[in-house]
Amino acid sequence: MRNSCIFLIWCLLFTIQVVMAQPSGKAGATKRYLYVATPGIRDYLGYGGHGLLVFDIDNNHRFVKRIATRGLHPNGKPSNVKGIAVSLPLNSIYISTLEGLQRIDLTTEKVVWEEPFEGGCDRMAISPDGRIMYLPSLEKGFWNVVNCETGDIIKKINVHKRAHNTIYGAAGNAVYMGDIASPWLHIADPKTHELVGNVGEFDNYVRPFTVNADESLAYVTVDSLLGFEVGDIKKGTRIAHIEVQGWERGPVRRHGNPSHGIGLTPDETEIWLCDGHNMRMHVFSAKPPYQQLTTIPVQDMPGWVTFSMDGRYAYPSSGEVIDVKTRKIVTTLTDEFHNNVASEKMVEVQFTGGKLARAGDQFGVGRRGAQTAGK
């Protein structure tokens, strides 16, 4: 009986804590949250289980709540999460899985719809106006252009062989499409939904990449390289090849290439690069000659990195929260059961007066001078 009472008291205290951490409804008050979709590393449930986990950025990234999500594999287990993105006008967050796409209302926290897509889904991007999504198939040869409100397919764009990563340019005039069986970064015009150019040729197949705010430069990881390359988007050429110094390139447990994950700090002064074999984040100057500045050890193999919108925090997929200025790990993400949370699919969401106001990006994209709709 005594143990039952203690358990009930613990549950009550936890509920009060979660309620107090909800987005503030006070006029003018802004709250910042990190939304983390799991399983965000393959189908591994040991890194946070299944759901959309919310952390309070302004309260030492303390766990707030778990929002129920869908997305089940035909075997009945939660399916790998492949991407996450936000539409401001539709007040919605989207999660792609191996098989489909789900839209969740950020106020009710209910699934609005879940749609399967022939050929599966990978890491998508949403237009600055929040209306159009470029949704890659699951390493097939095409992208679907999708209506964010309904989930309907507007157009299918054939690219090459293995569609994978997508960035929608901040100005809304270009979409950057990484096909991991191509040494070129492809570019589509979102007005016509046609391919209009590419950047490269890079030394090997394009893996994770990012772009700066004025869309003049692309920072690209490629197969077999512990390092990154730089592309001039306007000229469509590769202009730099940078290798990590002082660390051996070795085998990795996931993704198959040494540097799977690259991010540009929002002020565009630094490049943060993942090193899977050595379990490190390597930091470089974002200007030629791209000086290697430091190396930060992390607790597990990093396969992705993004940043808080203000540039204060770096979020490697291994679960640490790193202070960008001091390079120090300030905390690690843990769930309601005090288990470590790790995911390659996370995004910052801000509420002002209790209403959705701004959202970040799952990619570590440049933000210097960017004037976009809430991004």
Image (spheres, helix red, strand yellow):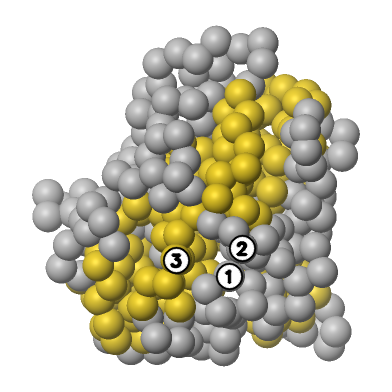
Q: Position of residue 24 (x, y in %)?
A: 75, 76
Left or right: where 353 falls relative to 151: right
Name the foreground residue: 296 vs 340: 296
Type of the residue with mark 2: Lys
Q: Position of residue 7 (x, y in %)?
A: 52, 46
**Horizontally, is 49 left or right of 321 in the view?**
left
SS type, badge 3: strand
Q: Is residue 18 above or below residue 23?
A: above
Looking at the image, is 156 positioned above or below residue 33?
A: below
User: Is residue 148 shown to the viewer in this render?
Assistant: no
Q: Report the residue marked by disc 2.
A: 234
Label 3: which residue?
A: 197
Question: Which SS class for mark 1?
Answer: loop
- Report the Cα–Cα distance between label 3 and label 1: 14 Å
Q: Residue at x 68, y 28 (%)?
A: 282
Question: What separation in Å lies between label 2 and label 1 (alpha carbons)?
Answer: 13 Å
Dot 2 alpha-carbon crowd within 10 angstroms: few under 14, some 14 to 19, many 20 or more: few
Q: Is residue 357 above or below residue 89?
A: above
In the rendered image of this protein, does residue 139 appear above or below residue 68?
A: above
Q: Which residue is mark 1?
A: 169
Image coordinates for residue 13, horizontal then vertical, percent: 65, 56
Is label 2 in contact with label 3 (beta carbons under 8 Å)? no
Q: How far apart, in angstroms, are the residues tagged by discs 2 and 3?
A: 10 Å
The foreground one among 332 and 365 is 365
